[in-house]
Amino acid sequence: MTDRNADIDEGPGLVLLLGGARSGKSTFAERLATKSGRSVAFIATAIAIDEDMRDRIARHQSSRPADWRTIEEPLHLAAALRQAAAAADVVILDCLTVWLSNWLFSQDNSAQLENDNTISARHYAGALQEIDALLQAVSELEPGKTLVVVSNEVGLGIVPAYALGRIYRDVLGLVNQRIAAAATRVYLMVAGLGVDIKRLDEAATL
């Protein structure tokens, strides 16, 4: 069931876009924002750490309308949302996947996790606290403001062979669940098409 006429509700809300690499998440988010006819701000979490990432960031920037405001924030999502929502009615956060990577490597002992066979509950709790702060900021949005969050689904492949990879996969899965539970709409992106899985879940019965 694809929602070809997907749009953004007028009231305060939260929309989550999930999918694999190159599934069309960012393009879909930008299309939703454009179709809304409202002012748009963009929270970019990526850091230009090498030439490839610099090229990716430049391509994304060039694809956005010139009147969209861009806020570059790799870590502090709640503060970035408040700043963006003060300037626009629709805010795109792209993406949680990169944000979590930034967050994990910002922790004091992340370098040691490569050789650690245990998964620290600290990393679960800390990341989820950041997401709870973001959701609190969403709950404080004025009427007519909407946050569109982009994130990857990384739990469908093989189990990572190294500890940090397992932590990343597991924490992102919990982060996605937390955002999805609070979202008014959740789209799963498949080959550029958005399937409204929240609506399907609500309709599911035995």
Image (tube, helix red, strand yellow):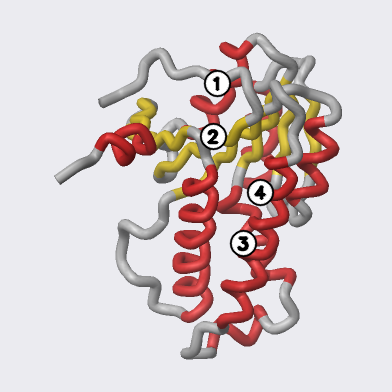
Label number found at residue 113: none
Secondary structure of residue under mark 1: loop
Whether the residues at callouts 1 and 2 have beta carbons within 8 Å, the answer is yes
Q: Residue at x 65, y 54 (%)?
A: 99
Pointer 1 or 2: first along the chain: 1
- The CA span between labels 1 and 4 is 18 Å
Q: Quadrant of residue 159?
A: bottom left
Label number found at residue 8: 1
Label number found at residue 135: 4
Q: Residues within 10 Å of mark 3 (few under 14, many from 20)?
A: some
Image height check: is 7 above or below 98? above
Residue 165 placement (x, y as % from top left): 48, 71
- The CA span between labels 1 and 2 is 8 Å
- The CA span between labels 4 and 2 is 12 Å
Q: Residues within 10 Å of mark 1 (few under 14, many from 20)?
A: many
Label number found at residue 15: 2
Q: Quadrant of residue 84?
A: top right
Pointer 4 or 2: first along the chain: 2
**Which circle, 1 or 3, is nearer the viewer?**
1
Q: Which residue is mark 3?
A: 101
Closest to the observer: 118 or 135?
135
> Is 20 placed left or right of 158 in the picture?
right
Q: Amino acid at mark 2?
A: Val
Q: Amino acid at mark 4?
A: Leu
Closest to the observer: 110 or 17?
17
> Is 163 placed left or right of 133 in the picture?
left
Image height check: is 6 above or below 51? above
Secondary structure of residue under mark 4: helix
